[in-house]
Amino acid sequence: MGYTQLLAKKEADALAAEVIERKRAERKLEEEREQLMVTLRSIGDGVITTDVNGNITLMNKVAEKLTGWKFSESFGKPLCNIFKIINDDTHEDCPNPVDMVFESGHTVKLPDRTRLVRKDGEELLIADSGSPLRKQDGSVSGVVLVFRDVTMERKAEIAIKNADKLESLGILAGGLAHDFNNYLGGILGHIELALNSIESGNTEQAVTELKGSLSVFGKAKDLTHQFLTFAKGGAPVLGEGSIIDLVQDTARFSISGSNSTLEFKAEANLPACVFDPNQIARVVQNMIINAKQAMPDGGPISISIHQKNIRSSHLPLSPGTYVVVSVSDKGKGIPQKLISRIFDPFFSTKEHGSGLGLSICYSIIKKHNGTIDVSRVAGGGTKFDIYLPAAKVITSSPKNKPHSREHSGKGKALVMDDDNHIREFLAYILKSMGYEVVCATDGSQVLQIMKNQTFKFIMLDLTIPGGMGGAETSLEIRKLYGDRDIILAMSGYADDCIISEPQRYKFNGSISKPFRINEIHDMLNHILAAKPSPRSPSPGL
């Protein structure tokens, strides 16, 4: 065999070996691919892989089932065309997980409450993660997505949470009914004793008993306000003043009758706050009750009030000056792992707690544009820091307001309320003040009455079941007569935004039910002194 032939043979043998090796490699690659597909088919989660451009290169059967797309029709298409995901709350498109992986360079997870929109339009709640596919040199060659349907899991979680909430609401309703029965029993008892005293001619004792019923009535009213604060958010009725006296008086009252002691100190020259005294008193009272319960054998409860300037903070607070009320105890303290949950509704560390007290407090302070921070005290105990935005000037306490002054006037007053007892009560009181009173049951009657006569002021109940309520009626009056009339809002929902901010809704003032006579005197004195008597244009203008 010549040299040339020998060289040709070597080249042919080398080429054959190369072909054999290539086929062996291809066969091995095919076996690995088949093994991969077998593995993917056996996985219970959906799997999709893409190339560096985000185009689909592989899908397993579960992914086909979940998306509604076949791999044969998805191959080479952009992932976003097949794997369409939206936010469950806003229904807006979620970020493309491929883009998220390429931007971060590591594994990412989709946000909770992500929905996958199938080819047929059906939506599934999914849990998903995306990871980069890397070559041997470490460069990213694509992305692998792993996702699963969690719709039934979420429904089960919601069902369990709802069951827990119903149980907690049962506890709450039972406690509420118990307290109300006590208050109603107290009111009824005082009234019956007053009637007996009147029959026996002891008018002095009758007056004492009636005053006692009014005292119990105030507690029942506070109870309804507390429940409304939790149920509807509790819009505060804000006023500006010092918080020191309110905190100290509330704390002293709340600690009375217990074996705990109170340590109180306040920084000098504290700025005023803008706050609702009733709601803040409720927060302080709740904090004191918690502190007492944390120390069943008694102990010191420390309250300090100081000023703090916030520039940046881990707390959800805007930069500015805050007045901080700190309440601390020497109890066992809250376990660190539970601190982040104590403001959650229905969460309680107490065996028979409803889990509403601290969530109500947090809701109140948040409505005041502040926050509550909680921490463990060294050596045992818990400290709550209540942050309230400071006002710009130092003022006196809101409690230092003048005593009620009886109101008297002349002219016509219009009262709208669907409850006959309220209409009769208001008519009696307003007539005793010197007014001629006309009553209506809903807004349509009010508008009809106003076609023929004018009034010095109009009192409108905001909620009229099956009829035109106060807000709608007021808008119609303003359309017909402009700002001619003094319009006052009434509501049994003390947290109604119109009650807390009447001027914003074109009312001149407001009063929450149930109200006492002195509150009507105060409202009319304030409103009628601030606004001159309306003109009397011809009817229908």
Image (tube, helix red, strand yellow):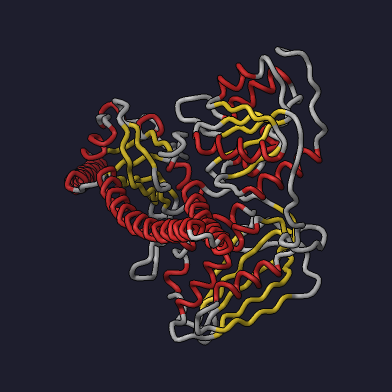
374 vs 357, nearest the viewer: 357
User: With 255 as the anchor, is 57 left or right in this view?
Assistant: left
The single residue placed furthest to the front in the displayed view is 201
Please, is residue 386 above or below residue 122 in the view? below
Q: Is residue 493 visible?
A: yes
How far across and how far down the image is residue 365, in percent? 59, 58
Please, is residue 540 above or below residue 27 in the view? above
123 vs 538, nearest the viewer: 538
Please, is residue 376 above or below residue 159 in the view? below
Residue drawn at the location 24% of the way across and 44% of the way down: 22
User: With 523 as the anchor, is 461 left or right in this view?
Assistant: left
Residue drawn at the location 43% of the way across and 43% of the way down: 97
Residue drawn at the location 25% of the way across and 28% of the way down: 72
219 vs 115, nearest the viewer: 219
Q: Is residue 13 visible?
A: no
Residue 212 image-quadrant placement: bottom right
User: With 173 as the anchor, is 498 left or right in this view?
Assistant: right
